[in-house]
């Protein structure tokens, strides 16, 4: 057998993001595994494998994005299917890990759903998880199996580096993204700023202060995900009003639910760079959006895992 314990590896995909799965498979020089994921008339999910996986290193690519529950169940059932077909090792490749925002008890009687989902993935039979930019790093510890936590920031950083812009400033839209902003600023060799917001009392509009100098700067707001886009667009508008020359934004996960598209379109953001961990329909695409692919990074991670190479080098 070559490459350690497994004679071969195969890549399968659910229905969440077939375009990304196809791109990853093409880079790996592998056809996607033959499998169909359908539904019974009552909505139950059915998975059928049409090729052997016995003793094979299997990679199942599935983002647990909207519809989150369907995509999560597809992933769990596909894991169960390959486990019962005697796969050698089962790797769940989850570019976007849903339910990650429910990572702790913020108030009494809250569930910790990120841990529940981790338990489900392990109970289904996964031997390893490969994911990107978890909303909270501690979610890695919710698993009792190896987790390869890839980061999207270097992809965004290279893009901004290639633009060769002057007077740059990286902005964190809230206190939770300061580390991410600092890492990008270090790569671009520029200062950072932080948006500090608070409500003076319930139902009163937010008061925003900017910690740092953004006047006359080309500002880049960086975050891990954009959901309803309230935080990032409010930050962009405040930065622009306070004297920024231009405002760009970048994020890994384009959740973009509810009023997000309308908010982004009307905001001061001149360019929004997103990674393709989540599929985005044509109706949600704006001229100011640019998409970068994570497929090469995931393909390289899969290659290194299969060949027992170092994955940590991909974090640089």
Image (cartoon, helix red, strand yellow):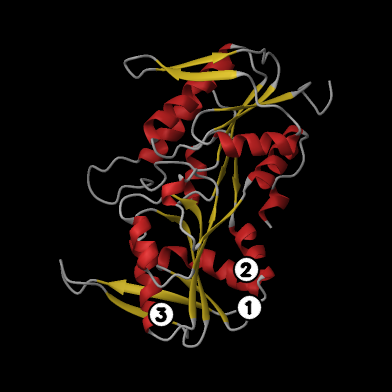
In contact (CB < 8 Å): disc 3 and disc 2: no
Task: Return the disc, 3 or 2, that comes first in the chain's sequence.
Answer: 2
In the image, residue 6 sits, relative to residue 194, either above or below, namely: above
Residue occupied by mark 1: 165
Direction from residue 149 to residue 301 in the image, left or right = right
Quadrant where the image shows the C terminus: bottom right
Residue occupied by mark 3: 240
Instruction: Give the crowd class for mark 2: few <14, some 14-19, many >=20 residues within 10 Å.
Output: some
In the image, residue 12 sits, relative to residue 217, either above or below, namely: above
Q: Position of residue 249 (x, y in %)?
A: 49, 66
Q: Residue furthest right?
A: 2
In the image, residue 214 sits, relative to residue 34, either above or below, namely: below
Direction from residue 202 to residue 67 in the image, left or right = right
Q: Give the number of the disc on residue 160.
A: 2
In contact (CB < 8 Å): disc 1 and disc 2: yes
What's the distance in space between the residues labelled 1 and 2, CA to CA?
8 Å
């Amino acid at each position: 057998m070559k490459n350690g314990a497994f004679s071969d590896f195969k890549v399968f995909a659910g229905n969440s993001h077939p375009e990304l799965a196809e791109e990853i498979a093409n880079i790996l020089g592998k056809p996607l595994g033959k499998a169909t994921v359908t539904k019974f008339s009552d909505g139950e999910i059915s998975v059928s494998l049409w090729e052997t996986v016995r003793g094979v290193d299997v990679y199942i690519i599935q983002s647990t994005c909207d519809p989150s529950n369907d995509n999560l169940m597809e992933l769990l059932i596909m894991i169960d299917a390959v486990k019962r077909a005697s796969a050698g090792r089962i790797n769940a490749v989850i570019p976007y890990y849903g339910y990650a925002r429910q990572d702790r008890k913020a108030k009494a009687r809250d569930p910790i759903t990120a841990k529940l989902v981790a338990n489900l993935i392990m109970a289904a039979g996964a031997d390893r998880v490969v994911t990107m930019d978890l909303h909270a790093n501690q979610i890695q510890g919710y698993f009792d199996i190896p987790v390869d936590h890839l980061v999207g920031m270097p992809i965004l950083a290279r893009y901004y580096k290639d633009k060769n812009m002057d007077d740059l400033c990286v902005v964190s839209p809230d206190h939770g993204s300061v580390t991410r902003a600092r890492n990008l600023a270090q790569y671009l060799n520029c200062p950072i700023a932080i948006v500090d917001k608070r409500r003076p009392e319930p139902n009163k509009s937010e008061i925003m202060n900017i910690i740092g100098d953004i006047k006359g700067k080309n500002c880049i707001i960086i975050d891990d995900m954009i959901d309803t886009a309230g935080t990032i667009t409010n930050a962009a508008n405040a930065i622009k009003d306070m004297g920024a020359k231009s405002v760009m934004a970048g994020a890994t996960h384009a959740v973009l639910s509810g009023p997000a598209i309308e908010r982004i379109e009307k905001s001061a953001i001149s360019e929004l760079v997103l990674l393709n961990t989540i599929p985005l329909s044509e109706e949600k695409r704006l001229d100011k959006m640019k998409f970068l692919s994570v497929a090469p990074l995931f393909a390289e991670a899969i290659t290194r895992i299969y060949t027992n190479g170092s994955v940590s080098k991909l974090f640089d």
